[in-house]
Image: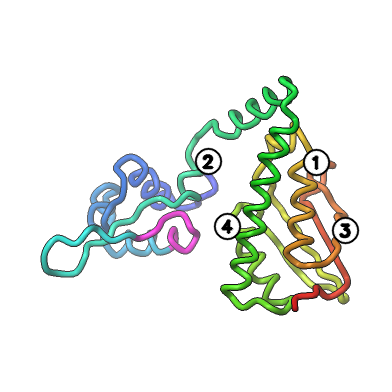
Amino acid sequence: MLDWIASDSRRSLLLAIKRSGPLSVDEAGAAIDRSTSTVREHLAELRDRGMVERVADAPSGRGRPRHRYRLTPEGEALFPGRDRELAGRLIAFLLERGETDLLEDFFNRFWAERTERVMQEFEASDATDRAERLRVLKQILAEEGFMPDINECDGAVVIRECNCPFPEAVKQTRLPCRLEAAFLETALDTALERVQYIPDGHDACTYTFAEPAACA
């Protein structure tokens, strides 16, 4: 899953951190046999892409704290895992056992927590107008892996979620899709129309609305 990273050095850095845990710039340079300046440049790029983050060691006496770089959840996701398969099989198991209500309760709670989070972010950012709410919403959707693209065209707002972070769940039940539409409507306080749908073969789940959101 590291193939999309064009630089061999950046791939090597991610692998070194995965194998050894958080590394300082000097340790990372020794691990991949590159100069300190080169490693700093690559780490800065990986940090900008959200793949690594810089953390400070616990203080030990005088002097400035030493910093190391560790993988973020996005960086960890680049490495092989079977969580997606496991989630799909768990959902299928619950459905086979007739635990539809339990499954719905789980998804409803999950999306309720997402809604609460976005409302808290709106309040913290003082996002009272439509443009500011769309900015905050786009940032949250990006962090959650939806790869959002939000544009205004001829008075209409178009929200494209170019990636589905829950593909195994959607294979088993369309409940996440319904809850996602309701989530966006609640966040923007306006009715939306879904005009494209990934399970129907489109490149994105696309929602649009023409009326300004009532962000009072």
Give the quarter of the image for residue 60: bottom left
Q: Nearer the viewer, residue 43 or 50?
A: 50
Report the residue at 74% width, 33% height from top. 101
Foreground disc of the pair 2, 1? 1
- Of the numbered discs in the image, which one, if any, rests on residue 143? 4
Q: Earlier in the sequence, mark 3 or mark 1?
A: 3
The magenta segment: 45-54
Which part of the image, by quadrant, shows the C terminus? bottom right
SS of the residue under disc 2: loop
Q: Which residue is denoted by mark 2 in the rendering? A: 1
Q: Is residue 49 left or right of residue 187?
A: left
Q: Which residue is denoted by mark 3 in the rendering? A: 193
> Rounded to the nearest whole Å, what is the CA distance between mark 3 and mark 2?
34 Å
Q: Earlier in the sequence, mark 3 or mark 4?
A: 4
What type is the residue that disc 2 sits on? Answer: Met
Label 2 with label 4: CB-CB less than 8 Å: no
Q: Earlier in the sequence, mark 3 or mark 2?
A: 2
Q: Is residue 15 left or right of residue 173?
A: left
Give the quarter of the image for residue 195: bottom right
Q: Earlier in the sequence, mark 1 or mark 4?
A: 4
Q: Residues within 10 Å of mark 4 (few under 14, many from 20)?
A: few
Q: At which x and y percent is residue 140?
A: 61, 61
> Rounded to the nearest whole Å, what is the CA distance between mark 3 and mark 4?
24 Å
Q: At which x and y percent is residue 196?
A: 85, 52
Q: Is residue 190 left or right of residue 150?
A: right
Q: Earlier in the sequence, mark 2 or mark 1?
A: 2
Q: At which x and y percent is residue 100?
A: 75, 30
Q: Which residue is denoted by mark 1 in the rendering? A: 199
